[in-house]
Amino acid sequence: MSQRYSISQSESDVQKDVIPASTYRLQLTPAFPFAAAGAALPYLSSLGVSHLHLSPVLEAVPGSAHGYDVTDHGRVREELGGERGLRALAAAARERGLALVLDIVPNHMALPSPLRLNRPLWEVAREGPASPYARWFDIDWEAGGGQLLLPVLARPDEPFTVDAGEDLLRCGDREFPLRAGTAHLPLPELLAAQWYRPAWWREARTSLNYRRFFTISDLIGVRVEDPAVFAATHAKVLELVRDGVVAGLRIDHVDGLADPEEYLRRLRAAAGPGCWVVVEKILARDERLPASWPVAGTTGYDALHRVDGVFTDAAGAGELTRQHGESTGTPSWEETASTAAREVLTGDLAAELATLERWAGPERASAVRELLIASPVYRTYPGGPGPDPQTLERAAARAGTAAVDGVRALLEQSPAFEARFAQTSAALRAKSLEDRAFYRWTPLLSATEVGGAPGAPAVAVAEFHAYCEERERDRPAAGTVLSTHDTKRSADVRARIAALSQAPEAMGPVGGPDPQLAWVARQSALGLGDVPERGPRLAAALLKAAREAALRTSWTDPDEAYEAAIADLVPPDPVELPPALSEAARANVLGMTLLHLTMPGVPEVYQGSESEFRALVDPDNRRPAEFPGEALAALDAGAAPATLAEEKLALTAALLRLRRSRPALFRGYAPLTADGPASDHCLAYTRPGGLVAVATRLSHRLAEAGGWRDTTLPLPPGHWLPTHGPRPSTPYEGKVRLSHLLATLPVAALTRAG
């Protein structure tokens, strides 16, 4: 890898990483434990993946469907099969040439019920700041009047009872530890004497005095910047790495940490050489991962945005934006995003804002607010560049130059303030963009994806090539993704919706009492098409969209009458794309798959997405995986693909197997340029090791213009054959006519013969 690190140990270890050929993400749940993953190994090995990427495996809240609510860092989750089950899975995978990558959660732990499941937090509640575990959590004792606010009560008037024999305070089915010597006090005095204050859940918005994950109060932030806390929370994971059970780590929400780079350096030193590490990090379009971070790169949302964007028509997206504005009255993307940021910061994150304002002082409070709202990136980093000039200018226009300069000085002088400011910024960007503005701005739903740029969704071919060349140079082992457990719509749903950018008239008239949600309903229905349980799945996604947008209803203040009418927006019958756009969607699905699996980086296939995978926002995208084993076996036996699902599966398997068996093919990157009247519709490149990838973009526009006609693609020197499917009578060489090369499929993957 070409990037340099200032600590030689980190540089050396990164260069020694064993890089996966590809990863396959499995969502583990009590219904799909380690044993179920083991049963899928024969299929996954046949598919061609090299590594299984497992969702979090440490002990979590009982019944958790995701595992990000960790309760005990020292144990592998018993509901999944425990450590014995994990080690057995690793051994079985190793026998088939596969390895494991773990998703780990350093930023937060659960505030569970019962609370005693989180022993460190239980001890802090019992002993207060004197507890050896008090250093684990970001708690502002002064702000809470010496008590930790626990916003866990369903009602403000819930009664308490005291169990003096067990030294417990009870409220309904919740239990809390009593401070030593307080069990026999009268109840009002007893409550006042505790190191915590059980409170109505609504108090979290304004009175919370601990750092949390985004706005989720039952996930409390962990101070892994403390070496002792790091050691305690990572001992089991590092043991699994040293024992060879785990070969790679995905770091969840790295932006939540006080000092991400220092954390990653400590992790790299502890894990040693060979362990592939990527971070879940959302980058703005022009933002890059700090070169000094000793990791392979991000998990790949930056790649997702480029792949989606190159199959989006800029002119059509602009027309949809115009229609959307006329229909809904929604302001520009910039105004939508800014409004959402202000709402979230002063509402959902009011407690976090109050902490920063108190630290900054009243004369600089408004500047804190305006700098956070104006920031175009998720966060800055300790010791790194501060806010850009445009951010400063926008903030100064509202808060005044002197106040902004004062906050900048404070950011430079106080590491603690800088860290908390950055952590709040990350939470604000996530909640205001991904979980609010993306649900309000609905001209083209395929563009409102994690890491996307909804206001300018299209990516030019030249920009895509420049991105890939930079990635190959700087972070060749970074991840690439198209569908994940967090994407709002799977790649195949987005591919269908993106086809609308080539024919905006296909949206048809959209109106009714809530035209904004009607746009969501129309595009979601087109994207989902005819799938099992279509109606309930659409209705659930629309309800979530309405609550996240927070225009007419919300999670905390639902409008029951309004929500009851949302199901009426679900069409009684499946809504399909017109035939011409259906073919364009096919070209998008296969084109996106081709780029994902051949561009620089380590591709991750989300469970089930090797075949056609249509899913909406979670929990829909976390439904039990369906592995197309029979279909793959039939294709391997010589059956010709008869459906788009089989075409995608055949393409995916061919490229995954190639990545695993011939990794040298996927080194280097050079654009290829077509010649002729339809050259803009061809996206092609070569991996100089011996691979050529060719994709059709904006195929509906291409068909309207008369097809490929005499457009040709000059191939690199040599003879070239397709990676799968029917072979030509003679290998391709020199200039090939795209009408011939792409006669049966809108994509081609070629390898040099001989």
Image (tube, grey):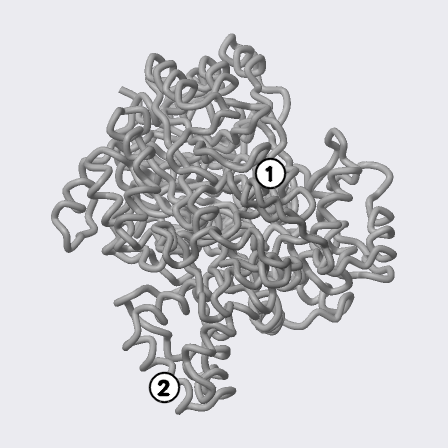
- Can residue 380 be seen here? yes
Residue furthest top in the image? 637
Quarter of the picture holding the N terminus: top left
In the image, 441 versus 547, the foreground residue is: 547
Q: Which residue is mark 1?
A: 492
In the image, 217 versus 532, the foreground residue is: 217
- Residues packed near mark 2 inside 10 Å, few (<14), some (14 to 19) or many (20 plus): some
Looking at the rendered structure, the kind of residue marked 2 is: Asp
Q: Is residue 371 above or below residue 32?
A: below
Q: Residue at x 80, y 61 (%)?
A: 515
Image coordinates of residue 191 in percent, x first then y, are 59, 59
Residue 748 shown left or right of residue 470 in the figure: right
Looking at the rendered structure, the kind of residue marked 1 is: Asp
Q: Which residue is mark 2?
A: 405
- Residues packed near mark 1 inside 10 Å, few (<14), some (14 to 19) or many (20 plus): many
Q: Is residue 512 above or below residue 631?
A: below
Image coordinates of residue 546 in percent, x first then y, are 73, 56
Cα distance in 3D space between marks 1 and 2: 47 Å
Image coordinates of residue 5 in percent, x first then y, are 18, 53
In the image, 384 versus 410, the foreground residue is: 410
Q: Is residue 33 above or below residue 694?
A: above
Q: Residue at x 43, y 37 (%)?
A: 72
Element type where label 2 sits in the image: helix
On the image, which quarter does residue 495 sit in?
Answer: top right
Residue furthest front in the image? 184
In the image, 407 versus 467, the foreground residue is: 407
Tell me, yes or no, whether the two marked residues, 1 and 2, touch with CB atoms within 8 Å.
Answer: no
Q: What label sits on residue 413 in the rendered view?
A: none
Looking at the image, tell me whether mark 1 or mark 2 is earlier in sequence order: 2
- Can residue 588 be seen here? no
Residue 660 shown left or right of residue 282 in the figure: left
Image coordinates of residue 513 in percent, x first then y, are 86, 62
